[in-house]
Amino acid sequence: MQDAKALKLVIEMAPEEFTLPEHRLILMAMKSLAEDGKPVDLVTMHDQLSAGKKIDIIGGVAYLMRLISFTPTTANVKTHIGIVRECSARRQLKSIGEALINASGDKERKIDEIREKAALTIRDVKAGETVKLISQEEALMMTYEKMDEAQKREGKPNDRIMTGIRGLDKRTGGLAGSKLVVIGARPSVGKSIFAMSICMNAAKAGKRVLYVSLEMEADEIMEREFAAASLVPLTEITSNEIQEESWMKLAQSIGYLASQQIFYCTEADTVEDIRKAAFFLFENGGIDLICVDYIQLMEATYARKQNRQEQVAEISRGLKKLAQEMKIPIIALSQLNRSSEKTQTGRRVKRAPTMSEARESGAIEQDANIFILLHDPDVDELEGDELKRTFKNLKDRGMKLIHVNVDKNRQGKKGWFYVAFDGDHMRFLSLSKEDPNEPEQG
Protein backbone atom coordinates (compact mmCIF):
# COMPACT_ATOMS: atom_id res chain seq x y z
CA MET A 1 0.00 0.00 0.00
CA GLN A 2 3.03 2.29 0.31
CA ASP A 3 5.13 1.38 -2.74
CA ALA A 4 4.00 0.27 -6.21
CA LYS A 5 7.34 -1.53 -6.79
CA ALA A 6 6.90 -3.52 -3.61
CA LEU A 7 3.35 -4.38 -4.69
CA LYS A 8 4.64 -6.20 -7.77
CA LEU A 9 6.54 -8.58 -5.51
CA VAL A 10 3.82 -9.01 -2.90
CA ILE A 11 0.99 -9.93 -5.30
CA GLU A 12 3.08 -12.91 -6.51
CA MET A 13 2.53 -14.48 -3.09
CA ALA A 14 -0.27 -16.94 -2.34
CA PRO A 15 -2.91 -16.12 0.33
CA GLU A 16 -2.21 -19.51 1.93
CA GLU A 17 1.30 -18.35 2.82
CA PHE A 18 -0.16 -16.13 5.55
CA THR A 19 -1.31 -17.54 8.88
CA LEU A 20 -3.93 -14.93 9.82
CA PRO A 21 -7.22 -14.98 7.87
CA GLU A 22 -7.32 -11.15 7.77
CA HIS A 23 -3.94 -11.03 6.04
CA ARG A 24 -5.17 -13.53 3.46
CA LEU A 25 -8.21 -11.31 2.76
CA ILE A 26 -6.00 -8.22 2.44
CA LEU A 27 -3.70 -9.94 -0.08
CA MET A 28 -6.69 -11.15 -2.11
CA ALA A 29 -8.05 -7.59 -2.23
CA MET A 30 -4.65 -6.31 -3.42
CA LYS A 31 -4.58 -8.93 -6.17
CA SER A 32 -8.08 -7.97 -7.34
CA LEU A 33 -7.18 -4.28 -7.55
CA ALA A 34 -3.93 -5.01 -9.39
CA GLU A 35 -5.70 -7.28 -11.90
CA ASP A 36 -8.20 -4.48 -12.61
CA GLY A 37 -5.35 -2.02 -13.15
CA LYS A 38 -6.33 0.08 -10.16
CA PRO A 39 -3.89 1.64 -7.67
CA VAL A 40 -3.49 -0.05 -4.28
CA ASP A 41 -3.60 2.40 -1.38
CA LEU A 42 -5.52 2.96 1.84
CA VAL A 43 -8.60 4.38 0.09
CA THR A 44 -8.90 1.78 -2.68
CA MET A 45 -8.27 -1.07 -0.24
CA HIS A 46 -11.03 0.22 2.05
CA ASP A 47 -13.46 0.38 -0.89
CA GLN A 48 -12.48 -3.08 -2.18
CA LEU A 49 -12.87 -4.76 1.20
CA SER A 50 -16.09 -2.88 1.96
CA ALA A 51 -17.61 -3.97 -1.37
CA GLY A 52 -16.96 -7.57 -0.45
CA LYS A 53 -18.20 -7.02 3.09
CA LYS A 54 -14.77 -7.99 4.45
CA ILE A 55 -13.72 -4.70 6.00
CA ASP A 56 -15.14 -5.53 9.44
CA ILE A 57 -13.59 -9.01 9.38
CA ILE A 58 -10.08 -7.59 9.08
CA GLY A 59 -10.64 -5.02 11.81
CA GLY A 60 -11.79 -2.02 9.78
CA VAL A 61 -9.78 0.84 8.32
CA ALA A 62 -7.97 1.18 11.65
CA TYR A 63 -6.21 -2.13 11.03
CA LEU A 64 -5.12 -1.05 7.53
CA MET A 65 -3.68 2.17 9.01
CA ARG A 66 -1.93 0.13 11.69
CA LEU A 67 -0.25 -2.00 9.02
CA ILE A 68 1.00 1.10 7.21
CA SER A 69 2.35 2.73 10.37
CA PHE A 70 3.97 -0.54 11.48
CA THR A 71 6.11 -0.62 8.28
CA PRO A 72 8.42 2.44 8.21
CA THR A 73 10.11 1.42 4.95
CA THR A 74 9.51 -0.92 2.01
CA ALA A 75 13.23 -1.24 1.22
CA ASN A 76 13.38 -4.66 2.87
CA VAL A 77 10.30 -6.11 1.19
CA LYS A 78 12.21 -9.05 -0.34
CA THR A 79 13.55 -10.03 3.07
CA HIS A 80 10.08 -9.74 4.62
CA ILE A 81 8.56 -11.91 1.88
CA GLY A 82 11.31 -14.47 2.50
CA ILE A 83 10.45 -14.58 6.21
CA VAL A 84 6.77 -15.16 5.46
CA ARG A 85 7.58 -17.91 2.96
CA GLU A 86 9.98 -19.65 5.34
CA CYS A 87 7.39 -19.66 8.11
CA SER A 88 4.77 -20.97 5.67
CA ALA A 89 7.09 -23.79 4.56
CA ARG A 90 7.81 -24.71 8.18
CA ARG A 91 4.09 -24.92 8.93
CA GLN A 92 3.56 -27.15 5.92
CA LEU A 93 6.46 -29.41 6.88
CA LYS A 94 5.15 -29.63 10.44
CA SER A 95 1.75 -30.65 9.09
CA ILE A 96 3.40 -33.25 6.84
CA GLY A 97 5.34 -34.61 9.81
CA GLU A 98 2.18 -34.99 11.87
CA ALA A 99 0.43 -36.71 8.97
CA LEU A 100 3.36 -39.12 8.54
CA ILE A 101 3.33 -39.97 12.23
CA ASN A 102 -0.36 -40.85 11.96
CA ALA A 103 0.15 -42.79 8.72
CA SER A 104 3.10 -44.77 10.10
CA GLY A 105 0.91 -45.93 12.97
CA ASP A 106 -1.64 -47.35 10.53
CA LYS A 107 -0.52 -50.97 10.12
CA GLU A 108 -2.88 -51.51 7.20
CA ARG A 109 -0.93 -49.08 5.02
CA LYS A 110 2.17 -50.31 3.19
CA ILE A 111 5.47 -48.63 4.00
CA ASP A 112 6.24 -47.96 0.30
CA GLU A 113 2.92 -46.14 -0.04
CA ILE A 114 3.74 -43.94 2.97
CA ARG A 115 7.24 -43.17 1.64
CA GLU A 116 5.94 -42.24 -1.81
CA LYS A 117 3.23 -40.02 -0.33
CA ALA A 118 5.85 -38.28 1.85
CA ALA A 119 8.16 -37.69 -1.13
CA LEU A 120 5.35 -36.29 -3.29
CA THR A 121 4.07 -34.01 -0.51
CA ILE A 122 7.52 -32.58 0.23
CA ARG A 123 8.06 -32.03 -3.49
CA ASP A 124 4.79 -30.06 -3.61
CA VAL A 125 6.03 -27.82 -0.78
CA LYS A 126 9.15 -27.02 -2.82
CA ALA A 127 7.09 -26.59 -6.00
CA GLY A 128 5.10 -23.86 -4.23
CA GLU A 129 8.15 -21.61 -4.07
CA THR A 130 8.10 -18.62 -6.40
CA VAL A 131 10.26 -18.97 -9.49
CA LYS A 132 12.96 -16.31 -9.62
CA LEU A 133 12.85 -14.18 -12.75
CA ILE A 134 15.89 -12.39 -14.15
CA SER A 135 15.41 -9.30 -16.29
CA GLN A 136 17.35 -8.65 -19.49
CA GLU A 137 19.27 -5.86 -17.71
CA GLU A 138 20.20 -8.11 -14.78
CA ALA A 139 21.28 -10.94 -17.10
CA LEU A 140 23.35 -8.52 -19.19
CA MET A 141 25.21 -7.08 -16.21
CA MET A 142 25.70 -10.50 -14.62
CA THR A 143 27.21 -11.90 -17.83
CA TYR A 144 29.41 -8.85 -18.41
CA GLU A 145 30.76 -9.02 -14.86
CA LYS A 146 31.44 -12.74 -15.28
CA MET A 147 33.43 -12.08 -18.48
CA ASP A 148 35.29 -9.22 -16.84
CA GLU A 149 36.19 -11.37 -13.83
CA ALA A 150 37.39 -14.19 -16.08
CA GLN A 151 39.60 -11.71 -17.97
CA LYS A 152 41.14 -10.48 -14.69
CA ARG A 153 41.85 -14.09 -13.69
CA GLU A 154 44.24 -14.56 -16.62
CA GLY A 155 47.17 -16.65 -15.40
CA LYS A 156 45.19 -17.88 -12.39
CA PRO A 157 43.50 -21.29 -12.01
CA ASN A 158 40.55 -21.72 -14.36
CA ASP A 159 37.14 -22.45 -12.85
CA ARG A 160 36.53 -24.90 -15.67
CA ILE A 161 37.62 -28.47 -15.10
CA MET A 162 40.09 -29.68 -17.70
CA THR A 163 39.55 -33.34 -18.58
CA GLY A 164 43.17 -34.10 -19.47
CA ILE A 165 41.99 -35.54 -22.81
CA ARG A 166 43.38 -33.10 -25.35
CA GLY A 167 40.76 -33.55 -28.07
CA LEU A 168 37.93 -33.11 -25.57
CA ASP A 169 39.42 -30.04 -23.90
CA LYS A 170 39.99 -28.49 -27.33
CA ARG A 171 36.27 -28.73 -28.14
CA THR A 172 34.77 -27.94 -24.74
CA GLY A 173 37.38 -25.66 -23.19
CA GLY A 174 36.96 -27.79 -20.07
CA LEU A 175 33.81 -28.69 -18.16
CA ALA A 176 31.92 -25.65 -16.90
CA GLY A 177 29.64 -25.42 -13.87
CA SER A 178 25.89 -26.18 -14.01
CA LYS A 179 26.36 -28.47 -17.03
CA LEU A 180 25.15 -32.05 -17.47
CA VAL A 181 27.76 -33.98 -19.45
CA VAL A 182 26.62 -37.37 -20.73
CA ILE A 183 29.08 -40.05 -21.86
CA GLY A 184 27.33 -42.76 -23.85
CA ALA A 185 28.66 -46.05 -25.14
CA ARG A 186 27.69 -49.66 -25.64
CA PRO A 187 28.79 -52.14 -22.96
CA SER A 188 32.52 -52.85 -22.57
CA VAL A 189 33.74 -49.91 -24.66
CA GLY A 190 35.36 -48.21 -21.67
CA LYS A 191 33.03 -45.38 -20.65
CA SER A 192 33.65 -45.96 -16.92
CA ILE A 193 37.41 -45.71 -17.41
CA PHE A 194 36.95 -42.66 -19.64
CA ALA A 195 34.95 -40.94 -16.89
CA MET A 196 37.37 -42.10 -14.22
CA SER A 197 40.28 -40.64 -16.22
CA ILE A 198 38.51 -37.27 -16.24
CA CYS A 199 37.89 -37.48 -12.48
CA MET A 200 41.51 -38.39 -11.74
CA ASN A 201 42.77 -35.51 -13.89
CA ALA A 202 40.38 -33.14 -12.12
CA ALA A 203 41.57 -34.36 -8.71
CA LYS A 204 45.18 -34.01 -9.84
CA ALA A 205 44.41 -30.33 -10.49
CA GLY A 206 43.14 -29.93 -6.92
CA LYS A 207 39.41 -30.40 -7.56
CA ARG A 208 37.16 -32.31 -5.14
CA VAL A 209 35.20 -35.06 -6.87
CA LEU A 210 32.22 -37.22 -5.90
CA TYR A 211 32.24 -40.50 -7.84
CA VAL A 212 28.93 -42.38 -7.62
CA SER A 213 29.20 -45.97 -8.83
CA LEU A 214 26.28 -48.38 -8.93
CA GLU A 215 28.27 -50.95 -10.90
CA MET A 216 31.49 -51.32 -8.88
CA GLU A 217 32.47 -51.25 -5.23
CA ALA A 218 35.12 -48.81 -3.99
CA ASP A 219 37.86 -51.47 -3.94
CA GLU A 220 37.15 -52.40 -7.57
CA ILE A 221 37.41 -48.76 -8.59
CA MET A 222 40.64 -48.38 -6.63
CA GLU A 223 42.16 -51.44 -8.33
CA ARG A 224 41.64 -49.67 -11.64
CA GLU A 225 43.17 -46.46 -10.28
CA PHE A 226 46.15 -48.43 -9.01
CA ALA A 227 46.60 -49.90 -12.50
CA ALA A 228 46.45 -46.45 -14.12
CA ALA A 229 48.79 -44.78 -11.62
CA SER A 230 51.37 -47.56 -11.26
CA LEU A 231 51.20 -49.06 -14.79
CA VAL A 232 50.83 -52.51 -13.22
CA PRO A 233 48.37 -54.49 -15.39
CA LEU A 234 44.91 -54.84 -13.85
CA THR A 235 44.92 -58.59 -14.45
CA GLU A 236 48.02 -58.87 -12.28
CA ILE A 237 46.37 -56.86 -9.50
CA THR A 238 43.10 -58.80 -9.53
CA SER A 239 44.69 -62.25 -9.89
CA ASN A 240 46.53 -61.96 -6.55
CA GLU A 241 49.78 -62.85 -8.35
CA ILE A 242 51.55 -59.52 -8.05
CA GLN A 243 55.25 -59.65 -8.94
CA GLU A 244 57.89 -58.17 -6.63
CA GLU A 245 58.74 -55.29 -8.96
CA SER A 246 55.04 -54.55 -9.30
CA TRP A 247 54.74 -54.20 -5.51
CA MET A 248 57.34 -51.43 -5.70
CA LYS A 249 55.36 -49.60 -8.37
CA LEU A 250 52.12 -49.96 -6.40
CA ALA A 251 53.76 -48.67 -3.23
CA GLN A 252 55.17 -45.66 -5.08
CA SER A 253 51.71 -44.77 -6.43
CA ILE A 254 50.05 -44.74 -3.00
CA GLY A 255 51.23 -41.23 -2.12
CA TYR A 256 49.95 -39.81 -5.40
CA LEU A 257 46.56 -41.54 -5.13
CA ALA A 258 46.15 -40.62 -1.46
CA SER A 259 46.61 -36.93 -2.26
CA GLN A 260 43.61 -36.91 -4.62
CA GLN A 261 40.33 -35.73 -3.14
CA ILE A 262 37.97 -38.23 -4.72
CA PHE A 263 35.06 -39.49 -2.62
CA TYR A 264 33.17 -42.64 -3.53
CA CYS A 265 29.53 -43.52 -2.99
CA THR A 266 28.23 -46.94 -4.04
CA GLU A 267 24.81 -46.80 -2.38
CA ALA A 268 23.24 -43.64 -3.82
CA ASP A 269 20.74 -45.03 -6.31
CA THR A 270 18.44 -41.97 -6.52
CA VAL A 271 19.06 -38.31 -7.33
CA GLU A 272 18.02 -37.44 -3.78
CA ASP A 273 20.70 -39.76 -2.39
CA ILE A 274 23.31 -38.12 -4.61
CA ARG A 275 22.10 -34.68 -3.51
CA LYS A 276 22.59 -35.63 0.15
CA ALA A 277 26.13 -36.88 -0.50
CA ALA A 278 26.97 -33.82 -2.60
CA PHE A 279 25.72 -31.34 0.01
CA PHE A 280 27.63 -33.17 2.73
CA LEU A 281 30.83 -32.59 0.75
CA PHE A 282 29.77 -29.03 -0.06
CA GLU A 283 29.45 -28.25 3.64
CA ASN A 284 32.68 -30.07 4.53
CA GLY A 285 35.35 -28.67 2.25
CA GLY A 286 33.47 -28.12 -1.02
CA ILE A 287 32.75 -30.08 -4.18
CA ASP A 288 33.73 -29.36 -7.81
CA LEU A 289 32.57 -32.34 -9.88
CA ILE A 290 30.12 -35.25 -9.67
CA CYS A 291 30.32 -38.40 -11.78
CA VAL A 292 27.47 -40.94 -11.92
CA ASP A 293 28.09 -44.44 -13.28
CA TYR A 294 25.50 -44.96 -14.70
CA ILE A 295 21.99 -43.51 -15.30
CA GLN A 296 20.17 -46.74 -16.19
CA LEU A 297 21.12 -48.33 -12.84
CA MET A 298 19.47 -45.51 -10.88
CA GLU A 299 15.97 -45.56 -9.40
CA ALA A 300 13.32 -42.86 -9.73
CA THR A 301 11.84 -41.23 -6.64
CA TYR A 302 8.53 -39.83 -7.89
CA ALA A 303 7.87 -41.78 -11.11
CA ARG A 304 8.30 -45.15 -9.41
CA LYS A 305 4.96 -46.42 -10.67
CA GLN A 306 5.48 -45.13 -14.22
CA ASN A 307 7.18 -46.95 -17.11
CA ARG A 308 10.95 -47.12 -17.25
CA GLN A 309 11.25 -44.39 -19.90
CA GLU A 310 9.48 -41.91 -17.60
CA GLN A 311 11.59 -43.02 -14.64
CA VAL A 312 14.84 -42.44 -16.54
CA ALA A 313 13.51 -39.08 -17.77
CA GLU A 314 12.95 -38.05 -14.14
CA ILE A 315 16.47 -39.16 -13.21
CA SER A 316 18.01 -37.26 -16.13
CA ARG A 317 16.10 -34.06 -15.30
CA GLY A 318 17.01 -34.46 -11.63
CA LEU A 319 20.73 -34.65 -12.40
CA LYS A 320 20.51 -31.58 -14.63
CA LYS A 321 18.71 -29.62 -11.89
CA LEU A 322 21.29 -30.75 -9.34
CA ALA A 323 24.11 -29.48 -11.57
CA GLN A 324 22.33 -26.12 -11.85
CA GLU A 325 21.58 -26.03 -8.13
CA MET A 326 25.18 -26.71 -7.10
CA LYS A 327 26.72 -24.81 -10.03
CA ILE A 328 29.14 -27.64 -10.82
CA PRO A 329 29.37 -30.03 -13.79
CA ILE A 330 27.88 -33.50 -13.47
CA ILE A 331 29.16 -36.33 -15.66
CA ALA A 332 26.52 -39.00 -16.17
CA LEU A 333 27.26 -42.23 -17.98
CA SER A 334 24.59 -43.78 -20.18
CA GLN A 335 24.31 -47.23 -21.65
CA LEU A 336 23.49 -47.29 -25.38
CA ASN A 337 21.35 -49.81 -27.19
CA ARG A 338 23.02 -52.28 -29.50
CA SER A 339 20.96 -50.96 -32.41
CA SER A 340 24.21 -49.49 -33.70
CA GLU A 341 25.28 -53.05 -34.45
CA LYS A 342 23.51 -54.56 -37.43
CA THR A 343 23.67 -58.12 -38.67
CA GLN A 344 24.45 -58.55 -42.34
CA THR A 345 24.99 -61.82 -44.17
CA GLY A 346 25.35 -63.77 -40.95
CA ARG A 347 27.89 -61.51 -39.26
CA ARG A 348 27.64 -58.49 -36.97
CA VAL A 349 28.60 -55.18 -38.52
CA LYS A 350 29.27 -52.19 -36.28
CA ARG A 351 28.74 -48.51 -36.89
CA ALA A 352 29.24 -45.42 -34.78
CA PRO A 353 26.36 -44.90 -32.30
CA THR A 354 24.09 -41.85 -32.08
CA MET A 355 22.59 -39.96 -29.14
CA SER A 356 19.12 -41.34 -29.88
CA GLU A 357 20.35 -44.79 -28.83
CA ALA A 358 20.57 -43.83 -25.14
CA ARG A 359 18.90 -46.80 -23.49
CA GLU A 360 15.37 -46.38 -22.08
CA SER A 361 14.91 -42.65 -22.63
CA GLY A 362 15.30 -39.91 -25.21
CA ALA A 363 15.15 -37.37 -22.38
CA ILE A 364 18.85 -37.94 -21.71
CA GLU A 365 19.66 -36.56 -25.16
CA GLN A 366 17.47 -33.50 -24.53
CA ASP A 367 18.78 -32.75 -21.02
CA ALA A 368 22.50 -33.06 -21.80
CA ASN A 369 24.50 -29.88 -22.33
CA ILE A 370 27.32 -31.99 -23.75
CA PHE A 371 26.85 -35.50 -25.16
CA ILE A 372 29.97 -37.57 -25.81
CA LEU A 373 29.78 -40.88 -27.69
CA LEU A 374 32.50 -43.55 -27.45
CA HIS A 375 32.91 -46.18 -30.14
CA ASP A 376 35.48 -48.93 -30.71
CA PRO A 377 35.49 -49.26 -34.50
CA ASP A 378 36.52 -52.24 -36.55
CA VAL A 379 39.36 -51.62 -39.01
CA ASP A 380 36.85 -51.84 -41.88
CA GLU A 381 35.10 -48.71 -40.58
CA LEU A 382 38.25 -46.59 -40.76
CA GLU A 383 39.07 -44.35 -43.68
CA GLY A 384 42.65 -43.74 -44.78
CA ASP A 385 45.76 -45.87 -44.61
CA GLU A 386 47.33 -43.80 -41.81
CA LEU A 387 44.39 -44.40 -39.48
CA LYS A 388 44.37 -48.09 -40.26
CA ARG A 389 48.10 -48.29 -39.47
CA THR A 390 47.42 -46.58 -36.14
CA PHE A 391 44.68 -49.13 -35.43
CA LYS A 392 47.06 -52.02 -36.20
CA ASN A 393 49.95 -50.57 -34.19
CA LEU A 394 47.77 -50.06 -31.16
CA LYS A 395 46.31 -53.54 -31.46
CA ASP A 396 49.80 -55.02 -31.59
CA ARG A 397 50.53 -53.26 -28.29
CA GLY A 398 47.37 -54.52 -26.64
CA MET A 399 45.47 -51.24 -27.04
CA LYS A 400 42.33 -50.14 -28.85
CA LEU A 401 41.61 -47.16 -31.06
CA ILE A 402 38.53 -45.37 -29.70
CA HIS A 403 36.42 -42.92 -31.68
CA VAL A 404 35.25 -40.04 -29.47
CA ASN A 405 32.39 -37.97 -30.87
CA VAL A 406 31.30 -34.74 -29.15
CA ASP A 407 27.88 -35.01 -30.79
CA LYS A 408 26.23 -32.22 -28.79
CA ASN A 409 27.84 -29.17 -27.25
CA ARG A 410 25.50 -26.28 -26.52
CA GLN A 411 28.24 -23.74 -25.87
CA GLY A 412 31.19 -25.06 -27.80
CA LYS A 413 32.43 -27.00 -30.79
CA LYS A 414 31.17 -30.37 -31.88
CA GLY A 415 33.36 -32.90 -33.65
CA TRP A 416 35.20 -36.17 -33.31
CA PHE A 417 38.72 -37.38 -32.63
CA TYR A 418 40.55 -40.59 -31.74
CA VAL A 419 42.24 -41.72 -28.53
CA ALA A 420 44.02 -44.88 -27.46
CA PHE A 421 42.49 -47.13 -24.80
CA ASP A 422 45.09 -48.97 -22.76
CA GLY A 423 42.88 -51.65 -21.24
CA ASP A 424 45.71 -53.35 -19.33
CA HIS A 425 46.37 -50.20 -17.34
CA MET A 426 42.85 -48.76 -17.33
CA ARG A 427 43.65 -45.44 -18.97
CA PHE A 428 42.93 -43.37 -22.07
CA LEU A 429 45.79 -41.75 -23.95
CA SER A 430 45.74 -38.90 -26.43
CA LEU A 431 47.51 -39.59 -29.72
CA SER A 432 50.75 -37.70 -30.22
CA LYS A 433 50.56 -34.58 -32.38
CA GLU A 434 53.85 -35.46 -34.02
CA ASP A 435 53.18 -39.17 -34.49
CA PRO A 436 49.52 -40.32 -34.57
CA ASN A 437 50.73 -43.89 -34.12
CA GLU A 438 52.24 -43.01 -30.74
CA PRO A 439 49.89 -42.61 -27.76
CA GLU A 440 50.77 -40.20 -25.02
CA GLN A 441 49.23 -39.55 -21.65
CA GLY A 442 47.17 -36.37 -21.26
Image: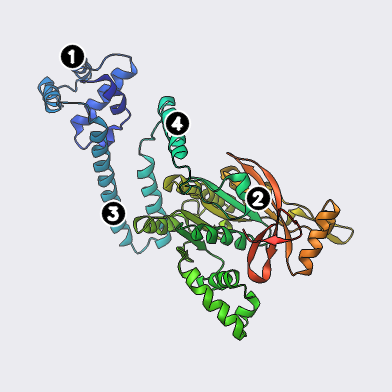
Residue 81 in the image: above or below residue 304: above
Callout 2: SS: helix
In the picture, measured across the screen, residue 348 lies left or right of residue 33, that is right
**Mark 2 / mark 4, whichever is N-terminal:** 4
Q: Hey, what amino acid is under mark 3?
A: Gly
Residue drawn at 36 percent across, 35 percent down: 130
Q: Hey, what amino acid is under mark 1?
A: Val
**Mark 4 / mark 1, whichever is N-terminal:** 1
Callout 4: SS: helix
Q: Which mark is residue 315?
A: none
In the picture, measured across the screen, residue 331 lies left or right of residue 50, that is right
Calculate the distance from the C-alpha at mark 2 to the C-alpha at mark 3.
Answer: 52 Å
Residue 20 location in percent, x, y? 19, 35
Residue at mark 4? 144
Residue 241 in the image: above or below residue 12: below
Calculate the distance from the C-alpha at mark 4 to the C-alpha at mark 3.
Answer: 45 Å
Q: Hey, what amino acid is under mark 4?
A: Tyr
Q: Are marks 4 and 3 in contact (CB under 8 Å)?
A: no
Q: Nearer the viewer, residue 113 or 33?
A: 33
- Snapshot quadrant of residue 429: bottom right
Residue drawn at 17 percent across, 17 percent down: 42
Residue at mark 2? 167
Calculate the distance from the C-alpha at mark 1 to the C-alpha at mark 2.
Answer: 68 Å
Residue at mark 3? 97
Residue 267 in the image: above or below residue 11: below
**Mark 2 / mark 3, whichever is N-terminal:** 3
Q: Are marks 2 and 3 in contact (CB under 8 Å)?
A: no
- Snapshot quadrant of residue 47: top left
**Mark 4 / mark 3, whichever is N-terminal:** 3
Quarter of the image that includes the C terminus: bottom right
Circle 2 or circle 3, nearest the eye: 2
**Mark 1 / mark 3, whichever is N-terminal:** 1
